[in-house]
Image (cartoon, rainbow, N blue to C red):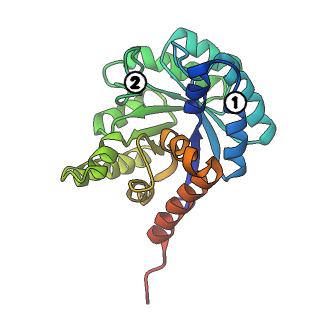
Amino acid sequence: MSTRLRLGVNIDHVATIRNARGGAAPDPARAAELAMAAGADGITAHLREDRRHISDADIEALAQLTRKRGLPLNLEMAVTAEMQAIALRHRPHAACLVPERREEVTTEGGLDVVGHRASIAPVVRSLVEAGVRVSLFIEPSPKQVAAAKLVGAQVVELHTGAYSDAAREGRPEAADRLASLRHAAGQAAALGLEVHAGHGLDYETVGPVAAIAEVVELNIGHFLIGEAIFTGLDAAIRRMRTRMDHARDALFAEPAA
């Protein structure tokens, strides 16, 4: 089990700002460069069906950039024939299959692997055969974790949104939400799945998730891009990295004699 926790930085909302006015600035590829320089272990980008932020040209540029720099690109994508073809064309290091609804503002929950095994399994198989590492973005549910293993995924990314919201608002169910994340992470690791986590994490909520031993990677985007408006992207990522490292160091610290 690795003591170091990887950080994937999602740069979608740099493209959101760019698209609000049109033109080329700010450039998501430049944000990816800055993120990598600040210590990000990888770049995540979600190519939505409606192209509301990241574009096909962005994915092309990010694929080239991350290959050149030797860091992974994690392509978030819906389970559709169009997105499958794009992933097979670019062959990113990883593809994270996520649910997608046109009317949602952001991804609102995990992929229902249990209910859609028949459509998900062939997409997973084709990507794995092409050398793409496949992750499924799921709720921390025992049934969803088990189904992820059954369809052939190599990784699960546990949806931390419900925990993050409850913890930030001081609601009592935050403890139960965190316990569900811990249980799902342990179950997934026992099944041989690599465990990632993400959605809604910020400086306040990241520590307890970073302290789940089985989790090896966090993917964080919206908060970091928002914080960058005030402190700069470099400072925002470095501060997040520090919070993650402190939680991890405490988890794996040698007990006092």
Vertical placement of 250 versus 221: above or below?
below
Image location of residue 244, percent across then percent down: 51, 59
Image location of residue 157, percent across then percent down: 45, 39
Task: Categorize mark 2 by other alpha carbons within 10 Å: few (<14), some (14-19), many (20+).
Answer: few
Image location of residue 51, percent across then percent down: 55, 16
Image mark for residue 27: 1
Vertical placement of 1 versus 47: above or below?
below
Amino acid type of the residue tagged 1 in the rendering? Asp
Amino acid type of the residue tagged 2 in the rendering? Val
Which badge, 2 or 1, is on the more N-terminal residue?
1
**Quarter-wise, where is residue 99 in the image?**
top left
Image mark for residue 159: none
> What is the spatial separation of the Cα atoms under label 2 and label 1, in whole angstroms?
21 Å
Is mark 2 in CB contact (under 8 Å) with mark 1? no
Furthest residue toward left:
172
Q: Nearer the viewer, residue 253 or 55?
A: 55
